[in-house]
Image (cartoon, rainbow, N blue to C red):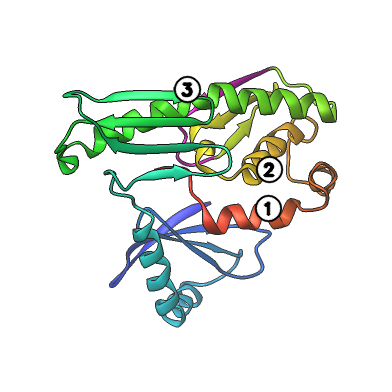
């Protein structure tokens, strides 16, 4: 269950009621404050929690703002899986050079990046999609074969809310933004969705299987992903 309250400093605060939650959990996504709350808390409890944690929320909002990248010649994606960079070229038009795991976008001299931010994001996402159709596809096949998983099909999507998902019929969807992650977290997400082909929930049996295929690191990897990365540029 989700609803929201208005705060004089932070504006709309999104509240999510979780029956399993034992305490308040706060995060900031796209400059919005999200708080997961246990069942049965009162409006006064929520107000006191916000007031008590105002400085922490401010820091989270500052961290979220820093994650919003302005795309220019300094922009790059540099992980052990994917290297994408922008360089100034001599051509009058944009030009892309790519190989597996690498992409260089050559920009015309004197490009005014402030006026083409949305277009540049679309270009970068499309390049990530082309890479994902090779790298994510091959990794999923590899892990499925290695651990004996079976899935119906695989689709690469531009989801900004999920890294991946698995349907009841075992069709797997992976976000193109996985290409911005280091390999160990990319692998975690793929294995997570493959484990859902066996357990379509987050039961103890699911996490036991996750620990089996990640050498006991499932929860540590999940926390690292949640705390440091998000599904968009």
Query: Residue 209's image quarter?
Result: top right
- Residue 158 lies in the magenta-colored region: yes
Q: Which residue is mark 3?
A: 130
Q: Earlier in the sequence, mark 2 or mark 3?
A: 3
Q: Earlier in the sequence, mark 3 or mark 1?
A: 3
When the figure is inspected, residue 219 is found, relative to residue 104, above or below; the finding is: below
Label 1 sits on a secondary structure element that is: helix
Residue 180 vs residue 184: left or right? left
Residue 93 percent coordinates (x, y): 20, 23
Q: Kindly indicate whether the residue at mark 1 contacts the one at mark 2 (C-beta within 8 angstroms).
A: yes
Label 3 sits on a secondary structure element that is: helix
Q: CA distance from mark 3 to mark 1?
A: 26 Å
Please give the range of residues in magenta: 153-162
Label 2 sits on a secondary structure element that is: helix
Residue 10 vs residue 34: left or right? left
Q: Which residue is mark 1?
A: 221
Q: Residues within 10 Å of mark 2 (few under 14, many from 20)?
A: some
Q: CA distance from mark 2 to mark 1?
A: 7 Å
In-front residue for pair 41/195: 195
Q: Which residue is mark 2?
A: 188
When the figure is inspected, residue 205 is found, relative to residue 154, above or below; the finding is: below
Where the C terminus falls, by quadrant?
top left
When the figure is inspected, residue 183 is found, relative to residue 152, above or below; the finding is: below
Residue 20 percent coordinates (x, y): 68, 59
């Amino acid at each position: 269950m989700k609803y929201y309250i208005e705060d004089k400093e932070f504006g709309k605060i999104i509240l999510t009621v979780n029956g399993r939650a034992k305490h308040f959990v706060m995060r900031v996504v796209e400059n919005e404050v999200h708080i997961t709350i246990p069942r049965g808390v009162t409006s006064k409890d929520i107000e006191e929690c916000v007031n008590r944690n105002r400085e922490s929320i401010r820091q989270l909002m500052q961290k979220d703002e820093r994650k919003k990248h302005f795309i220019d010649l300094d922009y790059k994606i540099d992980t052990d899986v994917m290297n994408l960079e922008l360089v100034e070229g001599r051509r009058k038009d944009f030009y892309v050079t790519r190989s597996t795991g690498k992409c260089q976008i050559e920009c015309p001299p004197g490009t005014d990046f402030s006026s083409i931010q949305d277009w540049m994001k679309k270009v970068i996402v499309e390049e990530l999609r082309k890479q994902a159709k090779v790298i994510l596809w091959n990794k999923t096949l590899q892990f499925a074969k290695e651990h004996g998983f079976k899935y119906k099909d695989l689709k690469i999507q531009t989801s900004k809310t999920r890294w991946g998902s698995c349907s009841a019929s075992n069709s797997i969807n992976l976000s193109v933004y996985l290409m911005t992650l280091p390999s160990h977290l990319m692998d975690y997400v793929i294995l997570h969705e493959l484990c859902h082909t066996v357990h379509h929930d987050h039961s103890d049996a699911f996490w036991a299987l996750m620990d089996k295929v990640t050498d006991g690191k499932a929860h540590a990897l999940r926390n690292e992903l949640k705390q440091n990365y998000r599904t968009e540029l």
